[in-house]
Image (cartoon, rainbow, N blue to C red):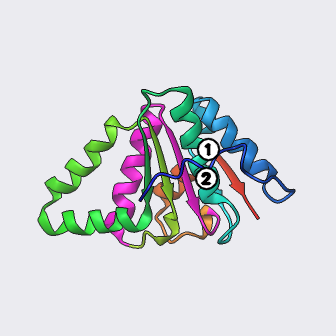
Amino acid sequence: MEWKEEYTFDTFRINDGNRFAKAAAYTVAQSSERSYIPLYIFGGSGTGKTHLTYAIGNYIKDQAPGCSVLYLGAEDYCKEIRKRMGESVHKINEYRANFRYVDVLLIEDVNLIKEDMGNEVLFHIINDFLNWNKRIVITSDCPPDRLDVDARLLTKMESGIIAEIN
């Protein structure tokens, strides 16, 4: 997916339904403090989740040019997991290991990840980022407790800030 440089905090329109989500996103962009991680933003289509996700990435890229920011859409993530599942477990572990070179991970539409293996790998990726004190932002169309995921993954997703946007 092409990086969206036009999505910034300055171009984000604030209203009563997104004020907290914007403040949380800006805080995560400015600080890698553990208590803010992960940031989980949820809301319906067209509410600004993608805009805020890219705004975080753009802010970090501007303020810390050497910082590695990765935007990962759920569809691309699932395709990669399926491809590697067809090869070997080693290939899945290799994929997961590549994330150690990423400083900030932005995962969009986590609600679309339905496969058990996709959720298992996601659990380990989120766990790794938390252990490494690296920033991770997750978006979804529903709150984390409405996702069809196991308790371990749910606990990780709920361990930071949860912000509804509407």
Q: Is residue 116 above or below residue 51?
A: below
| Residue 90 x %, y % | 14, 53
Residue at 36% over, 72% down: 115
Q: Is residue 161 above or below residue 154?
A: above
Q: How many marks?
A: 2
Quick one: quadrant of the C terminus?
bottom right
Residue 58's tag is: none
The residue wearing badge 1 is 160
| Residue 95 x %, y % | 25, 51
- What's the amino acid at mark 1? Gly
Q: Are marks 2 and 1 in contact (CB under 8 Å)?
A: yes
SS for callout 2: strand
Quick one: quadrant of the N terminus?
bottom left
Q: Which numbered disc, 2 or 1, marks the residue closer to the eye?
A: 2
SS for callout 1: loop
Residue at 52% over, 69% down: 111
Residue at 63% over, 68% down: 142
Query: Mark 2: few, some, or many residues within 10 Å (few <14, many ≥20)?
Result: many
| Residue 102 x %, y % | 38, 38
Q: Within the magenta stretch, is there residue 74? A: no
Taking depth in this image into account, of 48 and 25 the one nearest to the observer is 48
Q: Within the magenta stretch, is there residue 135? A: yes
In the visual, does 15 lie left or right of 98? right
Q: Which residues are magenta?
A: 115-143
In the visual, does 54 lie left or right of 12? left
Mark before the other along the chain sequence, 2 or 1: 2
| Residue 7 x %, y % | 62, 50
Taking depth in this image into account, of 164 and 3 the one nearest to the observer is 3
The span from disc 2 to disc 1 (Cα, nearest Å) is 7 Å
Residue 40's tag is: 2
